[in-house]
Amino acid sequence: MNLPRILIVDDEEEVRQAYLSILKPQRVSDGIDEIAASLFNSTENTVDLDQLTAFFEDDGAEMIVEEGLRTGTYELDEASQGMEAVEKIRHALAEERPYSLLFLDIRMPPGIDGVQAAREIRQLDPNVEIVIMTAYSDYSYEEIVSTVGNPERLLYFHKPFKSSQILQLASTLTQQWYLERKCTEQDRQWR
């Protein structure tokens, strides 16, 4: 099973930790605990989401978009500077394990800013989905698009953000990336 890879790039540790806490699988709680415990013959009051997913997959319910990709669970990585992100993208491509999504801040002193990093990343990987999340508008959206390119794979949001926004972006964009990649692979097979 392939997990979508997400790279979180922000110079503030607290912000990176906020992303990680939002995107890491959470534990099931409240009334569901008792139901899950009875389903798994468990005496423990909490059940890990992996256990619930395994139960539903074994039961034939669709918990995945397509075989090979489970939604809501990601391989998460982080960087604190723009050049560090560029190097992580380069390394991931060399390993043939590209990132599907990048959450990127603009201001990350002392190195290159997020727009410059996005431009370099876009040159390395034109298919990665980039979400620029910033508290400052040093650039207009038009400037960002003209610098980074490929506006179909570029979103721009202002901080602060809500956890539901991050979850929705991660789910939608990683699924889109995955399905487009599968279509491209199938298209190559037909040729």
Image: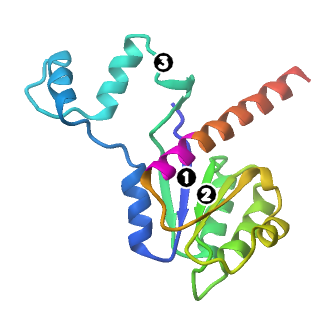
Q: Tell me if residue 189 comes above or below residue 72 in the rendering.
A: above
Question: What residue lies at 41% left-to-right and 18% top-to-bottom?
Answer: 57
Region of the chain picked out in magenta, as a range: 164-171
Label 1: how many residues lie within 10 Å, few (<14), some (14-19) or many (20+)? Answer: many
For this view, does 88 lie left or right of residue 127? left
SS of the residue under disc 3: loop
For disc 2, the marked residue is: 102
Of the 4 image quadrants, the one containing the C terminus is top right
Residue 100 horizontal/vertical position (percent): 63, 48
For disc 1, the marked residue is: 6
What count of labels does the image hold? Answer: 3
Disc number lying in front (1 or 3): 3
Q: Tell me if residue 4 comes above or below residue 53 in the rendering.
A: below
Residue 36 horizontal/vertical position (percent): 21, 23
For disc 3, the marked residue is: 62
Kindly identify the amino acid type of the residue bearing the numbered disc 2: Leu
Kindly identify the amino acid type of the residue bearing the numbered disc 1: Ile
